[in-house]
Image (spheres, rainbow, N blue to C red):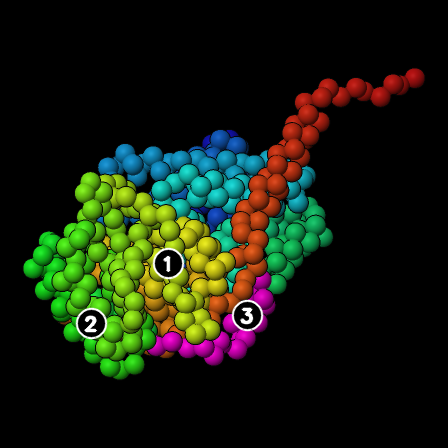
Amino acid sequence: MAFAVSYQRIMEAILAIIASATMFYFGNGLEPWWPLMWFAPLPLLLFALRSKWWAAALTTVAAMMLGNLNLWSYLVNTLGSPVSAWVRIFLAASVGFALAVLLFRTLVLRGAVWSGLLALPAFWVTSEYVRNLTSPHGTAGSLAYSQLKFLAFLQLASITGPWGMSFVLLLFPAAIAIGLHLRQSSPKRALQVAGVGIGVVALVLVFGLVRLAMPTQKQMVKVGLIASDEKANVTVTDPGADTERLFRDYAREASRLAGEGAQAIVMPEKLGVTLQGKAAGTDALLQSVASHTGATIVAGVVDVDPPVKYNQARIYTPGSGVQRYDKEHMLPPFESNLTIGTTRVLLPRSQQTWGVAICKDMDFESPSRLYGEAGAGLMLVPAWDFVVDASWHGHIAVMRGVEEGFSIARAAKQGFLTVSDDRGRIIGEVSSSSAPFATLLVSVPAAHDWTVYQWLGDWFAWVAIALLVVVAVQMARLHRKLSKPQIPAYQA
C-alpha cells in the first residue's frame, strides 16, 4: 500500500512538471502564446497542496527550469552568454518561484486561505520589482510581457505598470487552485476564493475593453520607418566613405517617404561611426532632406569623441542645427565600452511633443516616464535586435506606450519596423528583412494621453511589497501558534 501511494505521488509530480513546464515554455519567452500563462502555475499549485513541502519545492524548480529552456538558445547562442549564466539566472528564478509556492502551500494548508491567495503574486511581483531595480535588463524578465497581445488585459499597465499585470496573472491560478482544493471540505469558501480571483480578472478586462473603445486621439502624424538588413548594413559601418555611402542610401529612401507625406522618419540604431568634428558630410545628407521636405529625421550612429564613444541618435529638423540624444541603458557586454547618456530630447510641435530614445532604453521605466511627464505623445526610437528576439524585444516598447500615454515609432535592423499607439495596438509592422530597404509609412496618434501610472509610478509594486509583509506576519503568527505547547483542560 505504501509503495502504491509513493508511486502515485511520483506520477503526480511528473505530470505536474510536464504540464507546467510545457505551458511555461510556450506561454512565455520569445514567442509566447499568452493564454497558457494564465494556467501554467496551476498544476504545481495543486500538487503542492497534496504533497510534502520538499516534493512541492523540487517539482516546482524542475518545472521552471524546463520551462525556461525556451530562452537557452537565445542567451547562449545569440547573446553568447556562458551556460553557467543561464543556469545561474534561471535557477535563481526557479528557486524564488518555489519559495512563493511553498508560502502559498503553508498558508492554505493552515487555514489562512486569503493570505495564501495573495502570497504567490505578492512574492513574485516583489522579486520582479527588485530585479528591475538591480538588473541591467530592467523590466525585461517580467511575466507581464507574455500578455502584450491580450490588449484588454494590457490596459491595466496604464494604472499599475507591469507589476499589476504579473500580480493578476498569478492571482488567478492561485484562486482556482484554492477553490479546487477546498471544493469538498469547504465548498462555500472554495466558491468565495475562486469567485474573487475570477471577479478581479473580470473587472480588469471590463476596464480594458472600455479603454480600448474610447475614441482615438485626432492629432495624427504620418511617420515613416526605414531599415536595411543587407549584409553590409547589419554591422556598424566604418567612419568616412562607408558611412557616407550608407547615409546617402538612407537619405534617398527618406526623401521618398517624405514625398509621400512622412512628417517624422526613423532609422535604426548604430548605422555607422561618426567622428566628433568630422560628421559634416553625413549630417549634411540627412539635414538636406529635412530642410527640403520639412520632415524630422532620426538616425542612430556610434559617435566617437576620444576617449569616449556614444550610442547616439542624431536628429535632423528643418530650420535648426543637428540635435543629439545619447543612449541611457546599454546592453552588456556588447556596449560596456560606451558612455551613458543623461539628458532627454524633446521636439516641440504644434499641440504636440515628440521624444527620442534608443532600443534598450525602452526596457526601463526611465527615460519613458520622464518623457510621459513632459507630455510626449510620440516616441521616435532607433533600434537593433537579433532576429530571433524581434517580436519579444521589439514589442517590449509597446508597454511603455500604454504606461506613459504615447505612441511609438521604432525602427530596428534585424527586427521589425513597428508603429504602436498608446493602447498597445500595432498600427503597422513590417520585417526589416522584407526588402533591401524595408519601409513603413503609417499615420499614428501623437497627442499625449495622461495615465495613472505616469502620475503614481510604481505604486502597485509597493502594494505588493506591503502585502508580502502582511503575509509574512501571518505566517509567523501561525508558526508561533502551532509551536506553542497546548495545555490540556483541567478535569475534575
Q: Residue at x 51, y 45 (%)?
A: 125
Of marks 3 and 2, which one's residue comes earlier in the chain? 3
Q: Quadrant of the C terminus?
A: top right
Amino acid type at image mark 3: Arg
Taking 323 as reference, is 173 left or right?
Answer: right
> Residue under circle 2?
288
Residues at circles 2 and 1 in contact by the CB criterion of under 8 Å = no
Residue 299 in percent (x, y) is at 24, 62
Amino acid type at image mark 1: Val
Q: Residue at x 31, y 51 (%)?
A: 327
Q: Residue furthest bottom?
A: 260
Of marks 3 and 1, which one's residue comes earlier in the chain? 3
Residue 469 is at least partly visible in this image:
yes
From the viewer's perspective, is the residue at label 3 or at label 1 nearer? Answer: 1
**Dot 2: element:** helix
Disc 2 to disc 1, how far (Cα)? 21 Å
> Residue under circle 1?
345
Establish if 461 lies above or below 454: above
Q: Which residues are magenta?
A: 204-222
